[in-house]
Image (cartoon, coloured by chain):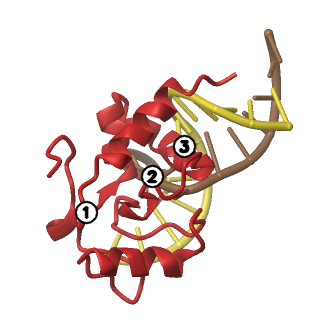
Chain colours: A red, B brown, C yellow
DNA sequence: TCACTGACTCTCA
DNA sequence: CTGAGAGCCAGTG
């Protein structure tokens, strides 16, 4: 039952996202080794075993749009957290990936 | 063990 | 150009 080898990897990557930066599910999936794992990435954050430790609010879809089902308290909290870190979030709950996109590896 | 679900992504009409 | 559908992987029931 799900040792969560991939999940653990996803969690580790998400925790490596520097403050004021965001990344996409597809990017995380790519870092895990499979670009098609994007769905699994979302599911991994969905279970979110350690909220507060795993900055799910820094994870968005490929368009930069925030997720609908958030584990911290709601899309509203996610937007506030991003703005608090210096990330400008549009009224549509979308961030500028051209500025805040994190490719991974380059932690602060 | 098998089948279904899912916070995504891509391609075709 | 816009909309809808199928595909993919891993985890849970």
In the image: residue C5, left or right of residue B12: right
Question: Element at badge 1?
Answer: loop
- Secondary structure of residue under mark 3: helix
Dot 1 surroundings within 10 Å: few (below 14), some, or many (20 or more)? Answer: some
- Picture layout, residue B5 above or below residue A100: above
C11 on left or right of A39: right
B11 to A37, vertically: above or below: below
Front-lying residue, A97 or A22 = A22
Q: Could you tell whether A73 is left or right of A89 in the image?
A: right
Return the residue at label 1: A19
**Residue at (54, 56) in percent of width and height:** A51
Q: Which mark is residue A6?
A: none
Question: In the figure, A31 relative to B6: above or below?
Answer: above
Q: Mark 3 sits on what residue?
A: A44
Where residue A100 sits: x, y (%)? 20, 66
Residue A61, image x, y percentages: 40, 60
- Mark 3 or 1: the one toward you: 1
Residue A59, picture quadrant: bottom left
Q: Residue at x 14, y 45 (%)?
A: A106
| Number of residues whose C-alpha sits closer than 10 Å to that of mark 3, classed few (under 14), some (14–19) or many (20 or more) | some
Q: Earlier in the sequence, mark 3 or mark 1?
A: 1
First in residue order: circle 1 vs circle 2: 1
**Disc 1/disc 2 C-alpha distance (Å):** 12 Å
Q: Quadrant of the N terminus of chain A?
A: top right
Q: Chain ID for label 3?
A: A
Q: Which residue is mark 2?
A: A54
Distance from disc 3 to disc 1, alpha carbons, whole Å, reads: 20 Å
Residue drawn 36% across and 48% down?
A15
Task: For label 2, count other residues whose C-alpha is less than 10 Å away and answer few (under 14), some (14-19) or many (20+).
Answer: many
Q: Chain of mark 1?
A: A
């Amino acid at each position: 039952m799900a040792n969560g080898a991939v999940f653990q990897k996803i969690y580790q990557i998400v925790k490596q996202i520097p403050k004021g930066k965001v990344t996409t599910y597809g990017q995380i999936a790519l870092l895990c080794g499979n670009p098609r794992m994007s769905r699994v990435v979302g599911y991994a954050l969905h279970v979110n075993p350690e909220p507060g430790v795993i900055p799910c609010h820094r994870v968005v879809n490929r368009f930069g749009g925030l997720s609908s089902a958030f584990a911290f308290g709601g899309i509203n909290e996610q937007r506030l957290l991003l703005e608090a870190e210096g990330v400008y979030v549009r009224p549509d709950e979308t961030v500028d990936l051209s500025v805040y996109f994190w490719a991974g590896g380059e932690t602060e």
